Image (spheres, rainbow, N blue to C red):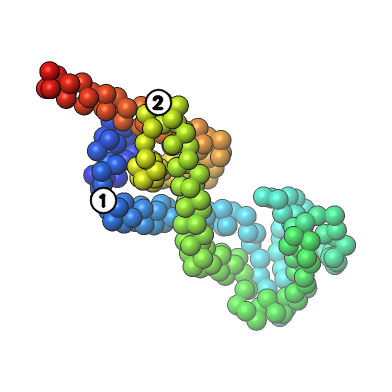
Amino acid sequence: MIKLFAKACYAFDEYSELVKTSWIKIFFYFIVVNAVTFALYLPGFYLIINENVPEFTISDGIFSTESKMDEDRYGVKYLIDTDKDFSNEDLSGISNGLAIDAHKIIAKNYGITQQMPMKEIEMIGIVDKSSVVSLFMVLFVSFGIFFYYFVVIIKVMFYVFMTMFLSLMLKNIISYPKALKITILSLTFPEILRAVLMLFSVTMPNIVYFLMMSAYLYFILKNIKKNGESTERKQGKQNG
């Protein structure tokens, strides 16, 4: 598994042999490598949550914090001010938002607005910043792993067709099963690099990811074609 991992990351000239790897080994490789990659995302996700959640306490149904907020982050409008009394009108004209005052939370998700008193928030165990961060981490680990595998499968489905398209452009058409194996293996380095960058609070733009994958697939397929031509020449000499 370790040798397969290393070769999948940098040994473009080995892919003509890697495509001969059994499907059982490819399946376990996909499960294990992506589980490790997901684990690498955990510290980065923790840092993002920890940096974005302000220090606060909830006691006797009263929310207290020294922080005030009125800004947009990741497409969500955040309003935090314990000196104000927010209403649904404060989130009008936006699709997603969160307004927090001393006595309640108003959440708007895709146009649907709901209110929850701080007493109810306190009853479910959310009483300070650490409890919120812990809740997010539990939810991320519990449900995030399934979502992550789903996203990776979608990526595989997209890039497998790119693999076949590039093989056509290089005039070295390969079968769909081979293209699928190449795609699964070639995703290794870009996915791990994206997770490692997140550890340093650096987000890899999707266009950079796309260009990296395109370059990976191009060089892999070019080497497969080169190895195939080399094999044909050797066989020709032997037959001659």
| Residue 180 position in % (x across, y down) | 39, 45
Which label lies toward us, 1 or 2?
A: 2
Query: Residue furthest toward the right?
Result: 89
Residue named by callout 2 = 171
Kindly state the secondary structure of the residue where label 2 is placed: loop
Q: Is residue 239 above or below residue 135?
A: above
The part of the image, by quadrant, that contains residue 107 is bottom right
Q: Nearer the viewer, residue 39 or 151?
A: 151
Mark 1, residue position: 22
| 201 relative position to 189: left or right | right
Mark 1: which secondary structure? Answer: loop
Q: CA distance from mark 1 to mark 2?
A: 26 Å
Residue at image point 16% right, 25% down:
235
In the displayed image of the protein, which residue is found farthest to the front?
Answer: 240
- Which residue is rendered at x = 21% and y = 26% of the image? 231
In this view, the residue in front, 202 or 213, is: 213
Q: Determine which quarter of the picture holds residue 61.
A: bottom right
- Give, as a three-letter code, the residue at label 2: Lys
Pick whichever of labels 1 and 2 is earlier in the sequence: 1
Left or right for 36, reference 228:
right
Q: Residue 130 at x, y = what percent? A: 56, 67
Task: Using the rendered image of the protein, determine whether residue 162 is visible from the camera's viewpoint.
Answer: yes
Q: Is residue 62 visible?
A: no
Nearer to us in this view, 23 or 96: 23
User: What amino acid type should be assigned to the residue bearing mark 1?
Assistant: Ser
Crowd band around label 1 with a 10 angstrom C-alpha radius: few (<14), some (14–19), many (20+):
few
Residue depicted at 85% across the width and 65% down the height: 88
